[in-house]
Amino acid sequence: MPPIAFKDKPEGPTCDFCVTPDAAHWVYPCRPFTLAGIGWKSPPRWWSACDRCAEHIDSGQWRLLLNRAVETAVSAIPGEVSTELAQRIRHGTHAIQEGFYRNQDGPKLAWTAYEQSHARS
Ligand SMILES: [Zn+2]
């Protein structure tokens, strides 16, 4: 499985959790971290989120967040997805979300506020 590629900072409104394009209305601050086991590096600071993922994050519904992310990741793969691959995706996604949970260091900002505050930097 190729590593999931995240940009240095959100440039377009794609959700970093469920990877739904044109759906992110929020950004969350998070200390950067790496997951050596799966060769994955977090965004340096900001994670974008769609309304549904933000709802799960803010209410601490981590299992719902994980299920949603795994479902969208699996459905984005063409053809049949083996049980083994689905489990690998679930395992990797769980590790990433757990890292976010441990390193999130502030409440979400509206995407528009984020965009305005970074527009002239
Ligand atoms: Zn999402």
Image (spheres, helix red, strand yellow):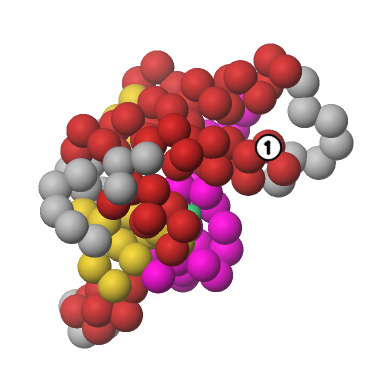
Q: Quadrant of the N terminus?
A: top right
Q: Secondary structure at mark 1?
A: helix
Residue at horizontal 24 percent and vertical 61 percent from the top = 108
Residue 8 at least partly seen? no
For the residue marked with disc 1, what is the amino acid? Val
User: Between residues 18 and 42, which one lies in front from this camera angle?
Assistant: 18
Give the residues in magenta: 1-25
Residue at horizontal 77 percent and vertical 28 percent from the top = 81
User: Between residues 6 and 93, which one lies in front from this camera angle?
Assistant: 93
Looking at the image, residue 70 lies above or below residue 8 = above
Residue 5 sits inside the magenta stretch: yes
Residue 27, by quadrant, is: bottom left
Residue 60 appears left or right of 104: right
Please state the horizontal and vertical placement of residue 95, each as a whole percent of the image. Answer: 39, 26
Looking at the image, residue 39 lies above or below residue 4 = above
Please state the horizontal and vertical placement of residue 54, each as a whole percent of the image. Answer: 37, 56
Residue 29, by quadrant, is: bottom left
Please state the horizontal and vertical placement of residue 26, each as a whole percent of the image. Answer: 34, 66
Magenta span: predominant SS is loop
Q: Mark 1 = which residue?
A: 74
Q: Residues within 10 Å of mark 1 (few under 14, many from 20)?
A: some
